[in-house]
Amino acid sequence: MSAVTSASLCLTLLSVCLLFVSADQKIIIAVPGQTVTLPCRAPNSGNPIIAAEWSRADLEQEYVLFHRDDKLDTEEQHPSFKNRVDLQDRQMKDGDVSLILKDVKTDDSGAYECYVVQRGANRRKRASLDSDPISTTYLTVVPPSQKNITAEFGQNVTLTCRAPNTVLIPGVEWSRRDLKAQYVLWYWEKQFVPYYQHPSFKNRVDLQDRQIKDGDVSLILKNVTNADGGTYECCVVQEVREGRKLAILKTEPISIIHLKVISPGQTGGHGEDGAVGLTVVIVLSIVLFATIIYYIKMTENTEGEKNSTSQTSSKLKRSTRVTRPTFRSKKTEALKTDITKP
């Protein structure tokens, strides 16, 4: 298929996405340690922005970020966000008040609201409380999972991956590190996208649940071969609308699977983390230990029996020894006999 056709398909996908995503609400999934950008753009009213605030409902009176008079105000900032947040553009050009949040943690999950005060409005120390947010971003931070899976040649395997079930997931991408630009599977808006899929995976991969219920985006890989060994990564594909711009964003991997393929009957076992192989090693170790103990006991018993037999034999020899008369005693008896003869 030509590049023009592919481009038109992508544009079609994007136009469909506009029907499902509100202009002022975004969903972002991140992994711990990542730096994320929460988008927000003020309406183009012609009035310059004099203050911007980002808040989270569960923080009550403390805010995430408050910017006014060309600087950050940290007086009532929640301690967990100190030195971790900033505006993408402190000049707020073209109404851009997007928030940069560094080194995200699981505790950062929540609904973030963006407020602005433009010149001509009442100026307050806090900008937001009497107005509606111009943008709401739902951030979910998911700890990535890592697993080792061993499978036999020709077997079907399931590579598990689960995204938060509290967010809408328009798409998912499975990739393998050594494939570079080509992917294993790309699923978007309930359709498989075949472009740029590595040829070796065509008609061999599927999602465990195409409806992605409860965030299940696990991959089924059929009839595995030795060439399928490698490190697989699961990423959720999202879309973020910022003003008139719509961006397709891919999260950092939320699941990493190390797959090893072995020949049938080869030592190494089946399943995750080499559990069977580990069990075999443990059993063999126990048997070997028991054999050694048995050998030592048998050796000790044999030595004891030998010593007992030797001692008994020595006693028997001493008790059955015959005392023979010596030549001197015979001679004395003979002399006595000669003297008494007449």
Image (cartoon, rainbow, N blue to C red):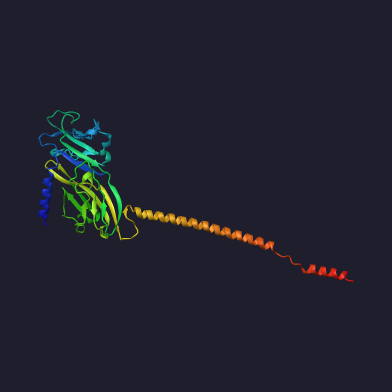
Q: Quadrant for residue 33, please give it.
A: top left
Q: Is residue 330 left or right of residue 215?
A: right
Residue 163 versus residue 270 in the image, above or below? above
Q: From the top left corner, tell me how far across and down residue 108 is, in percent.
A: 25, 39
Q: Residue furthest front?
A: 342
Taking the image as drawn, is residue 39 in sight?
no
Residue 186 versus residue 243 in the image, above or below? below
Residue depicted at 53% across the width and 59% down the height:
299
Taking the image as drawn, is residue 303 in sight?
yes
Toward the viewer: 42 or 281? 281
Q: From the top left corner, tell me how far across and down residue 333 is, in percent.
A: 82, 68
Toward the viewer: 16 or 221? 221
Q: From the top left corner, tell me how far across and down residue 263 is, in percent.
A: 30, 61
Q: Is residue 164 left or right of residue 18?
A: right
Residue 256 versus residue 69 in the image, above or below? below
Q: Quadrant for residue 56, please give it.
A: top left
Toward the viewer: 234 or 166? 166
Residue depicted at 19% across the width and 51% down the height:
186
Q: From the top left corner, tell me how far across and down residue 130 is, in percent.
A: 16, 29
Q: Is residue 304 left or right of residue 226?
A: right
Residue depicted at 66% across the width and 62% down the height:
316
Query: Is the N terminus in the top left, top right, bottom left or bottom right quadrant?
Result: bottom left
Q: Quadrant for residue 132, please give it.
A: top left
Query: Is the C terminus in the top left, top right, bottom left or bottom right quadrant?
Result: bottom right
**Callout count:** 0
Toward the viewer: 91 or 236? 236
